Amino acid sequence: MADQQAFHFEGTFFETLSIRIVEATRERVVADMDVRPELTTVGGRLHGGAIMSLADSIGAYGAFLALPKDAAGTTTIESKTNFFAGAAEGTVRAESVPLHVGGRTSVWQTRITNQAGRLVSQTVQTQMVLTK
Amino acid sequence: MADQQAFHFEGTFFETLSIRIVEATRERVVADMDVRPELTTVGGRLHGGAIMSLADSIGAYGAFLALPKDAAGTTTIESKTNFFAGAAEGTVRAESVPLHVGGRTSVWQTRITNQAGRLVSQTVQTQMVLTK
Amino acid sequence: MADQQAFHFEGTFFETLSIRIVEATRERVVADMDVRPELTTVGGRLHGGAIMSLADSIGAYGAFLALPKDAAGTTTIESKTNFFAGAAEGTVRAESVPLHVGGRTSVWQTRITNQAGRLVSQTVQTQMVLTK
Amino acid sequence: MADQQAFHFEGTFFETLSIRIVEATRERVVADMDVRPELTTVGGRLHGGAIMSLADSIGAYGAFLALPKDAAGTTTIESKTNFFAGAAEGTVRAESVPLHVGGRTSVWQTRITNQAGRLVSQTVQTQMVLTK
């Protein structure tokens, strides 16, 4: 598992979201996030933006782990989410896997499920490989 | 202009993001958001998730204002963002306009620009009209 | 399996593409398409538009099969494709499965693989349920 | 204006679609396409795939014209379309403009309108710059 602390997430958006990495390899990233009021809509459900933020965070995390050795980093160039169900309580779990890992881009697909096990969303995002 | 307070944003994700609505009609929503540490990546730039969250928030706001009179509400069913430039300081401005307003869906396009006036991102999202 | 002839595809774009339905249920649609010159780019590879057309056709076909009994039809409201590899010869195979089947929309994911078994593309599309 | 014949479109998908380039510069590509039976659905409307194919073709054309001098070519890596209205007769017009032109990618937005002047679709696609 990757050393999450190596990224110095303290005080960043990653911490604002309170994402907890459960597993992280170049082939799969799993993370949990609680449905806290600060992340919800006026209707008390997890905000679509928080859902996309969780997906973006762990997809980019996987892309970072899968970078070629000589790369300088990775940045999201596009992201698409479909929403299927809400999450009003408990914890959501996100799982991100690569659809493609190449020298110039990698593409990650993230599915988020709610406490009841229903599919909340699916995100597909393209990460650009940055060179030095 | 819509009464922003009517939504009771206190304590929600909208407040976490510190979005300030500048203008809001059924034809255009404009909002500002500051690049605060709590919204940035470990690299000190506005997090892609925060960018998508801003877009989602004001696109949904516009969709709400454009709802047919007998509708019960609106929910985002899909959202797509392309990222073009970063935002490391100051304030970003988001402007959302409808591409389509119909009885079953509306589609909103949001462009976000950074302090220097460069295009940071473009989001297109589909809002479902909820019926009672 | 659905009766493909029931749709009177003769002379339509479906026939222009020469799509051959291999299997079609409300849970899975599989189809083949040959890499013919009329469907390729100037570089001799299957055109991205032909790839998206194949995906759109069979995703919509699945959505049609999964419609509620009292529905009038279905129409694609949005479609997103990521491209991973080319197809320069032989036949590509497309497989479409639903991510969501609801009363107002269904969402279909289609993966296309080339003759060598490599993933060519992934499409996710939203189909609106039309009512009478 | 670019010399369309330079691409040897004869016998390719571009010709299958009967796309007529009206104007083509690195800042704007405009093209027309007729609503012929071979491009329609069983319902007699322009097929969503044909609409996406037209957008993909002219977006890629613009990306080609906007390539850096030392580039080897361009390929579509992702494409997203929202559909708003149908086209059952006459000619549709597509206009493609760049949202971003960079050294590694360019992003093109294409709007297609039907004979009556209604917006049929909007596509945003990312083109990768290929190097020698």
Image (cartoon, coloured by chain):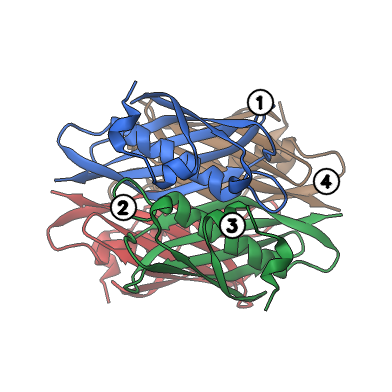
Chain colours: A blue, B green, C brown, D red
Whether marks 1 and 2 lie on the same chain: no
User: Does residue C43 show up?
Assistant: yes
Identify the amino acid type marked 1.
Answer: Gly
Considering the numbered disc 3 on the image, is that residue within a helix, a strand or a loop?
Answer: helix
Mark 2: few/some/many CA within 10 Å (<14, 14-19, 20+)? some
Mark 3: few/some/many CA within 10 Å (<14, 14-19, 20+)? many
Quarter residue C31 falls in: top right
> Residue C114 at what x, y percent from top left?
39, 30
Which residue bears the numbered disc 2? B44
Direction from residue A97 to residue B95 in the image, left or right: right
| Residue C71, disc | 4
Which residue bears the numbered disc 1? A117
Vertical order, C131 against C102 (above or below): below
How far apart marks 2 and 4 lie (CA) works out to 50 Å
Mark 1: few/some/many CA within 10 Å (<14, 14-19, 20+)? few
| Residue A63, disc | none
How far apart marks 1 and 2 lie (CA) works out to 35 Å
Considering the numbered disc 2 on the image, is that residue within a helix, a strand or a loop?
Answer: loop
Vertical order, D22 against B102 (above or below): below
Which residue bears the numbered disc 3? B14
Q: Residue at x 48, y 39 (%)?
A: A55
> Residue A41 at what x, y percent from top left?
66, 51
Disc 3 vs disc 1: which is toward the camera?
A: 3
Q: Which quadrant of the rendered structure holds the N terminus of chain B?
A: bottom right
Direction from residue C46 to residue A68 in the image, left or right: left
